[in-house]
């Protein structure tokens, strides 16, 4: 019978389980990159666009690496529901996890306040836990009800926004110039895009615009990311990975089929090598992309800040 914490889970170091989870996610992303090239996020985007963002049995949106991972699980496993819950959560809702169902590991971070014995100062110690969740397609007798949440959600990612509204409402300076270059200039703090009529289709335009909008969030006056000054460097390629993930997240939110630019293919091998050498990089990239995406939403005039 499946359970949240199996016997061998209790005997395993939490950090080891978290690392194993990140390794599996990184391998999944690498496989998608090798199979789909620059369109590696498309299976995830398609699944989320059709069925909705991954949500918990408390009807709360997953964020960061869990949002990316569970979206990929939905796509690869063919689940038609975006709802996930632990064995105990489903049981408390009167549902039964089907025998033989394989759970998915999610990562939960928290902080524990402890008092330093030598200095007497109180400091926060980061804690990491993994939980096993099951998709609603893996359970029986679920009525569709959700568990109550401890704190009400102010805002989530379910707003139906248009990409044009997002571009118009953001405080970013966007110049449309009759040329082929698209870029964000940190020095001038502006985005430059070709004119709309120069793009072959809406997917190409929005994919480019949202990508550059994510770069814009990394300015020193905003989220202060390291861009990297040399083309092809690790920092440069990593920022591009953040922008690709962030653009994919924004395209889900704005309900547009935004595709990556063809020239982003030059980063694929760098991303694959980066994730192969350091699987934890996908956690950092997904977290930064999530933060950047929410920053863009929060800067629009009509959208309130989403609850953490």
Image (cartoon, rainbow, N blue to C red):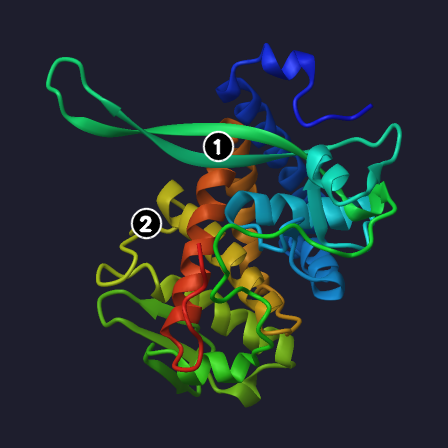
Q: Secondary structure at mark 2?
A: loop
Q: Which residue is mark 1?
A: 280
- Regarding residue 306, the answer to whether it shows in the image is yes
Residue 71: where, in percent of width, then height?
67, 50
Question: Which image quarter is the N terminus in?
Answer: top right
Question: Which image quarter is the C terminus in?
Answer: bottom left
Front in this rendered view, residue 150 or 167: 150
Front in this rendered view, residue 141 or 260: 141
Q: In this view, which residue lies farthest toward the top? A: 11
Q: Residue at x 42, y 50 (%)?
A: 288
Residue 168: where, in percent of width, then height?
43, 85
Q: In this view, which residue lies farthest toward the left? A: 119
Mark 2 / mark 1, whichever is N-terminal: 2
Label 2 Cα neighbours within 10 Å, binned few <14 / some 14-19 / many ≥20: few
Residue 225, placed above or below residue 26:
below
Residue 67, placed above or below residue 187:
above
Residue 14, placed above or below residue 260:
above
Q: Toward which corner of the image does residue 106 lie, by quadrant?
A: top right
Q: Which residue is mark 2?
A: 230
Q: Secondary structure at mark 1?
A: loop
Disc 2 to disc 1, how far (Cα)?
A: 23 Å
Q: Is residue 173 left or right of residue 98?
A: left
In front: label 2 or label 1: 1
Residue 150: where, in percent of width, then height?
51, 50
Count up the numbered dots.
2
Q: Residue at x 63, y 38 (%)?
A: 30
Residue 182: where, in percent of width, then height?
44, 72
Q: Residue at x 53, y 55 (%)?
A: 245
């Amino acid at each position: 019978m499946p359970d949240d914490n199996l016997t061998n889970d209790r005997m395993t170091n939490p950090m080891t389980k978290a690392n194993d989870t990140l390794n599996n996610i990184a391998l999944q992303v690498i496989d998608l990159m090798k199979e789909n090239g620059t369109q590696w996020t498309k299976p995830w985007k398609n699944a989320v666009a059709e069925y909705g963002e991954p949500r918990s049995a408390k009807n709360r949106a997953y964020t960061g690496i869990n949002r990316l991972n569970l979206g990929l699980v939905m796509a690869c496993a063919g689940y038609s529901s975006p709802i996930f819950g632990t064995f105990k959560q489903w049981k408390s809702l009167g549902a039964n996890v089907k025998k033989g169902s394989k759970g998915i590991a999610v990562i939960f971070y928290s902080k524990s306040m402890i008092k330093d014995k030598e200095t007497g100062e109180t400091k926060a110690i980061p804690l990491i836990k993994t939980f096993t969740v099951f998709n609603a397609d893996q359970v029986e007798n679920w009525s569709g009800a959700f568990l109550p949440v401890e704190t009400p959600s102010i805002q989530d990612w379910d707003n139906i926004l248009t990409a044009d509204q997002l571009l118009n409402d953001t405080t970013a300076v966007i110049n449309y110039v009759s040329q082929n270059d698209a870029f964000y200039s940190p020095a001038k703090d502006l985005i430059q895009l070709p004119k709309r009529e120069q793009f072959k289709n809406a997917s190409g335009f929005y994919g480019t615009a949202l990508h550059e909008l994510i770069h814009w969030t990394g300015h020193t006056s905003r989220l202060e990311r390291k861009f990297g000054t040399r083309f092809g460097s690790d920092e440069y390629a990593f920022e591009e990975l953040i922008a690709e993930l962030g653009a994919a997240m924004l395209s889900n939110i704005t309900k547009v089929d935004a595709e990556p630019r063809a020239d982003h293919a030059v980063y694929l091998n760098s991303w694959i090598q980066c994730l192969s050498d350091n699987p934890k990089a996908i956690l950092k990239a997904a977290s930064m992309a999530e933060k950047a995406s929410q920053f863009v939403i929060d800067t629009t005039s009509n959208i309130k800040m989403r609850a953490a």
